[in-house]
Image (cartoon, grey):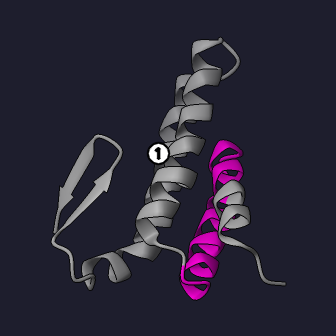
């Protein structure tokens, strides 16, 4: 079953919010196969999922440990994407307000 870019990004967001590391890694691989930009997946999927976890913490509906776990989950997804990002023609990637020099 093939997913659209929007479906993959939505799945990535939900997987991070659910703290599902294996799903995040699988979605990252699927996104690469589907030609989705790694930067878009990170910004619109992984980071937005982190925001959901942060919002739940602010509302008192989650614990600080879940924020750390979500960060670990995102890092696992980025590890899958890193080889493609590193081989990119561009030397700099933007993640919202964060700039990462390669």
Q: Quadrant of the C terminus?
A: bottom left
Queried whether the magenta region covers residue 27, the answer comes back as yes
Q: Where does label 1 land, which residue?
A: 71
Count up the numbered dots: 1
Please indicate whether residue 48 sits to the left or right of residue 22 in the image.
Answer: left
Residue 67 placement (x, y as % from top left) = 52, 33
The reply to whether residue 59 is visible in this rendering is yes
Q: Quadrant of the N terminus?
A: bottom right
Residue 56 placement (x, y as % from top left) = 65, 23
Residue 14 placement (x, y as % from top left) = 71, 49
In the depicted structure, whether residue 90 falls above or below residue 1: above
Between 52 and 19, the residue placed more toward the observer is 52
In the depicted structure, whether residue 28 falls above or below residue 41: below
Residue drawn 15% across the image and 72% down it: 91
Residue drawn 59% across the image and 76% down it: 31
Residue drawn 65% across the image and 47% down it: 19
**Magenta-colored span:** 12-35
């Amino acid at each position: 079953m093939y997913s659209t870019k929007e479906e993959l990004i939505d799945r990535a967001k939900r997987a991070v919010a659910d703290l599902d590391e294996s799903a995040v890694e699988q979605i990252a691989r699927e996104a690469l196969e589907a030609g989705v930009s790694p930067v878009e997946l990170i910004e619109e999927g992984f980071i937005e999922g982190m925001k959901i976890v942060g919002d739940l913490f602010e509302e008192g509906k989650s614990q600080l440990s879940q924020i750390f776990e979500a960060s670990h989950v995102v890092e696992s997804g980025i590890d899958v994407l890193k080889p493609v990002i590193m081989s990119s023609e561009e030397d700099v990637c933007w993640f919202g307000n964060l700039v990462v020099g390669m």
